[in-house]
Amino acid sequence: MASLIGTTKRRRRIVLITAVTSVVLGLVLASPSSANLAGSSFEGNDGNMIVNTTGHTDWANVAGVNTGIDRTSGSTDNSFGQGTKEDSSAVTVVSGSIPPNKNDLTRFYEASELASNGHNYLYLAWERLVNIGNANLDFEINQKTTAGFTGSTTGPVTLNRTAGDILVSYDFGGSGTPTLGVNFWLTAAAGNTVGQCFSANALPCWGRHVTLSGGVAEGAVNTQAITDPLNGNASLGAGLFGEASIDLTAAGVFPAGTCEAFGSAFVKSRSSSSFTAEIKDFIAPIGVNISNCGTITIHKVTENGDSSFGYTTTGSLSPSTFSLSNGGTQAYSAVPAGSSSVTENLTSAQQTTGWTLKSLTCLPPTGSGTSVTISGATVNITMGAAGAVDCTYTNHINLNPTITTTLSASAANIGDQVHDSASLHGATSNAGGTVTYHAYAGANTCTGTDLLNSTVTVTNGSVPDSAAISFNTAGSYSFQAVYSGDANNNGATSVCSTEQLLVKANPSIGTTLSATSVNVGSSVHDSATLSGASADASGTVTYTVYSNTGCSLGARDAGTVTVSNGVVPDSNALTFNAVGTFYWQAVYSGDTKNNGATSTCTSEQLVVNPLQPAASTAQSLIPNDSFTLSGGFSPTGSITFSLFSPADSSCSGTPALTQTVPVSGNGTYSTSNTTFTVTTEGTWRWQSSYGGDTNNLSVTSTCGTEQFTIANH
């Protein structure tokens, strides 16, 4: 920036020829054909609004134009009243026609840019209703807006001015080039001759006046009719349009190492070239964005969760510390040129729970002289004029999913195929990695030799089934699934005890009867043998006998026995007292390692046959005898009958049958045998005797006189 040469505290008038007491930036304003300001492509000295040189910009194509429009001239137009001067903060707005010998403003334009050379350029233009020759205008550019100051405002207004606000003076004498200057709003004396009030007014005031010269500023008023492309190509006669370009950096508005930003601008006309002249017409303030301040924006992104992350800064950043969580942004909008840094600081608790800084990325910085370097969790920033730095911290934590499993069956037979299925819970929707399925012998062990070892690939959280497996040995087996994890998910292992498979042998039972054909009245028992059972098979076997081939009728219990290490005891013995065909069946109960089994009903048939007696015969008779007593005298007493077996032919032994019959007189007397039966073959002999009495002698028959013979053939 050119040095300030001098000033005067009581200067009353700005003239077209720069006085020696002004602060001058060495200039003679360029003619419309001279070059643009160094570093800017804007054609601000040609008095028109179109591009004359390819590659340049003008109002027709400059970026970011802000437009102010005055109220219609006449009774509704507004202006400052009550003798308002430039140094007046408390102003009065009135409505009514602008006198014909005063400038009646209609529109104004503002644009600004930060060029590649790091300088900020300000572009201004004005339009008026009538060409009255000279034009004495001031563009007031404030850092802050004045509430309620609009085109429809009337009455008192207190302008919201801040130390450092600028006032660009535009004095045109009716021909030639305008004289441009800039004043700064002062709220306290600078302590030296430079920086005091430009007029005789006391602080606060517009002061530290700088007259802008060629190379720092340029301007022009149209000398012939032009069209306004920003207003529908409306025609503007000669002298109705004026423009200016100002290098704000070279003019000292944006000194090196400072941060200045302006957000409001309006234009007003003085009644004469004197700085203390009364202010008349104005166009109400519009919003602008004129700044050499850099911006630093820090974004926070978290993956798989959220936390509050703390940051510390160096340099002039304020606040010097801040915290961000997911989606949060910390923006510094008034960063001066210079060095600063931002560092993320993970707490020990965050590190313990697994938070990491996954990435720190910055967009390419903008602004001449602006650069960034990244070192770990720190962004080191060198800020140029109006630079912009935009960085994103991405923090990551893995989720802790769980994995559950489901077997295709909880019990199976030897040789049956089963498979395992797994599901992830609490993982990201795009979870990848692998799941390895394991199978182990034994209940709730999950140790030893892996019998399965089937690995599948997880896609978007979906886990395929394991390979199929079968077992050749009965017993309990434990399954387990292990998830590998991926970049967003920690690994997980299913609970061993939740997935148990019981594999059972499928034995058969065979039976053998002690006899398959017996005579009625005989006893029979059954024997059983297990085949295909485990060596330690237990349980029971129940034997039953049925009378039909379906083993459903006439059931007789033959006993229930206990199986020990696969050995089956025999059944109870059953006696069969009826002829017929009977069917034995053995039913094995099974145990934890063996399924039950039932023998085939028709495989064990017992025939009970009737007895065949011998074809021999034998006679049998009930013998009786009679004895006739005659010639006696009223005999009494008794007669004894004796029957001797064939073995006693002399009737000398003990008789086989003896009966005594009482006698009462002469007559025939007989035996009355009804129970003794003779069956022995041979000759049976009777011998009978009367014992006599006092009047009669005894008498005995001869042995064998009476006999009979039994012969069986």
Image (cartoon, rainbow, N blue to C red):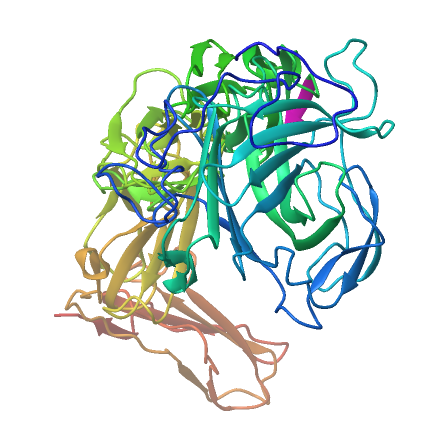
Is 132 in front, or is 265?
132
Q: Is residue 645 above or below residue 62?
A: below
Is 118 in front, or is 412?
118
Is 296 in front, or is 499?
296
Task: Look at the image and give the residue range highlighted in magenta.
Answer: 321-325
Picture coordinates of residue 94, whole percent (x, y): 79, 62
Asked if residue 327 can be seen in this view, the reply is: no
Asked if residue 350 can be seen in this view, the reply is: yes
- Side of 266 where 218 appears, left or right: left
The main secondary structure of the magenta stretch is strand
- Side of 612 where 254 appears, left or right: right
Picture coordinates of residue 645, whole percent (x, y): 33, 63
Q: Residue at x 62, y 26 (%)?
A: 260
Residue 175 drawn in magenta: no
Is 583 in front, or is 7?
7
Pick the quarter of the image with the C terminus: bottom left
Picture coordinates of residue 151, whole percent (x, y): 68, 61
